[in-house]
Image (cartoon, rainbow, N blue to C red):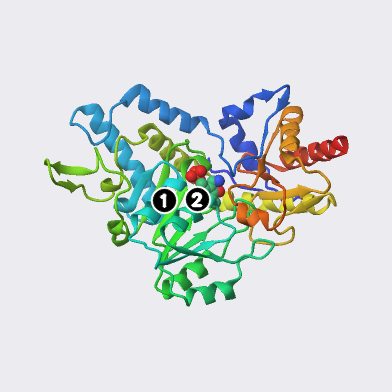
Amino acid sequence: MRPTAITNGSGVPPDLAALTRPDFPLLQTTVDGHRIVYLDNAATSLTPRQVLDEMNRFYAAVGANVHRGKHVLSEQASDDFENVRTRVAQFTGFRGDEVVFTANTTASINAVASGMPLTSDDLVLVPFDGHHSAMLPFRRAAEVRYIPVDGSGFVDLDRYSDLLRLGPTVVVLNHCSNVTGVYAPIAQMAEMAKEAGAVTLLDAAQSAGHRRIRDDNLDFLAFSAHKMLGPTGVGILCGRRAQLARLRPPALGGGVVDWVDSQRYELRKLPHSLEAGTPNIAGVYGLGAALDYLDRIGFTDLADHDRALGDALAAEARDREDLRVLGPVGSADRGAILSFTIRRIHNLKEIAKILSDAYGVMCRSGHMCAQPFVDGFTDDEVLRVSGYLYNDREDVAALFSALDAVIDSVR
Ligand code: PMP
């Protein structure tokens, strides 16, 4: 059955949560008698039993390595593994041989930054509100300039346009900020970057589980299975064939070569030449099941739910004078991510711990691996809450009532 989001008075469609919660074993558990209100999805999402079952199927019924032998179990593992590659290709609009399995988004971006023939003479534009994983790999490989964003996390398109006139070799775009939840206008930005002759890379770590991404102006696309209901340890790098072919393989060894003598070797064809060693086979099975799960719900409902949840979080924050939100609290193209500080309270780690231990509310404190951006807003850390399909209006209410109580008791 395909669930349909129904919007109620609060603007939050409640039924995706009601429909999907029974599938998540972790949500059936409690912490010290409190039901778990899991609001740390921007760090990693929970795993439905369908994904767990599929990974278990690999270990229980298939078990063998991929692309290594001709016995029936190895052939089964290879077929299943390659079928997931095809699923990822359908999901992203890239071709099957343009999909590379890595360990995570960080590894995918590093494969591009260290695999392209970049030098300090090359200019790379990276988003100022980007994740460290989207900036540090290029800071090591080339000259980096930042695509400016304002205090709410909106890209300054005029200054972006000025930067493009400098002729960057690569432009890295951040689809959805893991701090503000703001979606960048990537269709326009990728088109502008292509017109300027740059290679484009989209960091879709925060968006891939919420919105379908299809854009011919993207040369590379990076995301992680673990933020979209899949397992940890599986990342995806999609790259247009000509661009992938330019990458120096990040690692050499088994799996990437067709033939080796004592002096020379011949690389396998793409994408295998970029996948050295035994991959996370069970994890790739799990990714396939996660994509099936998300597809059954449908990306229209997923995106609507994400927007409505984001608006509900922002509206509650807007009503509280004690909270200073890093990002928009009014209308914006946003997802369900909200970061804030609390006036006159500095130890946000402690607040996160009390929310967890006394109320069962899981959220994150820190710089969110986007420290240059967060440092422009506060000398402290921020507290971040982030929802997904199994969160609803009740979770938002539980969070804010717990937060009100904690702020009162700490003061
Ligand atoms: N980019 C963004 C926008 C992220 O939010 C994250 C994870 N927080 C990453 C990259 C890195 O993802 P991973 O840890 O899976 O490599």
Is disc 1 surrounded by few (<14), some (14 to 19) or many (20+) residues within 10 Å? many
Residue 342, position in %: x, y? Answer: 79, 47
**In the picture, which quadrant includes the C terminus?**
top right
* Residue in view at x 32 percent, y 53 percent: 98
**To which residue does mark 2 refer?**
133
Q: Is residue 7 among what the camera can see?
A: no
Does dot 1 land on a helix, a strand or a loop?
Answer: helix
Does dot 2 land on a helix, a strand or a loop?
Answer: helix
Is disc 2 surrounded by few (<14), some (14 to 19) or many (20+) residues within 10 Å? some
Residue 110 is marked as 1
Residue 31, position in %: x, y? Answer: 69, 24
Asked whether mark 2 lies closer than 8 Å to ligand 1, one says yes
| Image vertical order of residue 116 relative to residue 390, above or below | below
* Residue in view at x 34 percent, y 58 percent: 116
Amino acid type, residue under disc 1 in the picture = Asn
Q: Quadrant of residue 356?
A: top right
* Residue in view at x 54 percent, y 43 percent: 2
